Amino acid sequence: DVEAGVFDGLNAVTSFKYCFSDCTALTTLPAGLFAGRTTAYDFTYTFENTGIAAVPAELFADVRDYSSADLSYTFAECKSLKTVPATLFEKFTTVTSPGFKNTFNASGIETIPAGLFSKNVKVSTGFEETFYNSASLRTIEGPIFPKTTTVSSLAYTFRGCTALESLPEDLFENLAESKIKFTGTFMNCAALKTIPENLFAANSIATQFTFTFASCTALKTIPGNLFGANEKMTSVKSLFYCCSALESIPETIFATTPAITTFERAFAGCTSLTAIPERLF
């Protein structure tokens, strides 16, 4: 157990790095745990591998809104944590990096609420590997990212989310003006059965789609117009690498993407393919 006032008087504290890491018997957190800690911004590994099953919505309400705020691995390996409040990170309006890298790495998170990162409008690479290896993740309730121009990478954000079967069509719609690299974003999502046709419809300035769906071993079909709005994409290297259940390739998938310079290993390891469309390229 932890009492709400345990940190009272630490008026200059900046970091709670590893503070409760590996406290496996810790199951609950008081809402006012960081109340009044207005100088704190480093929460790296703070609750890693604890037994917490819920997080108070106001947990970070009083902390410092700082560009270098760090929530890397904050809830990593919290196997009992199934979801978090949609407003949990709204205080961090100026964070750029490290931001939310691996925040829920290998956690028990099952549901991501819509709008979880809606206030984090300055993040650049800070959403990389955020839910990496969260093998229990089943539901993304809608757009979770902010309306911003700054996000430059969603590398491996959902990699290894092996229970994720479907994706909301509007997942990336708020990032329409961000030039994003979708490197390995859904790599090894082994239960992913379908891809919404308009998943990338808003991301017309995105250029790199390398390893994006690599090792999605349950994926059988690809929407014909999946990249219909992505005229500037230049690389699809290993895009569907080792999608071993993929049975067909739509002839139109690259019909509107004239800037692609490499198709290296795009369909390598797709062992269920029986034909290649004549006009694919």
Image: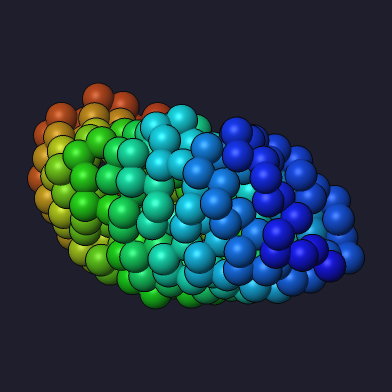
Residue extending farthest to the top is 261
- Give the x, y percent position of residue 197: 24, 65
Q: Tally the marks.
A: 0
Q: Position of residue 114 (x, y in %)?
A: 36, 70
Examine the rendered structure and indicate whether residue 68 appears above or below residue 21.
Answer: above
The residue positioned 79% from the left and 63% from the top of the image is: 2
Residue 194 visible in the displayed image: no
Query: Quadrant of the rendered structure where residue 55 is?
Result: bottom right
Question: Which residue does the image show at 64% across and 48% down from the upper left?
Answer: 74
The N terminus, quarter of image: bottom right
Q: Nearer the viewer, residue 9 or 103?
A: 9
User: Farthest residue in the front direction?
Assistant: 9
Residue that appears at 57% across and 46% down: 37
Where 266 sits versus 171, above or below?
above
Residue 267 % position (x, y)? 43, 44
Q: Residue at x 77, y 65 (%)?
A: 3
Give the quadrant of residue 201: bottom left
Q: In this orientation, does residue 17 appear?
A: yes
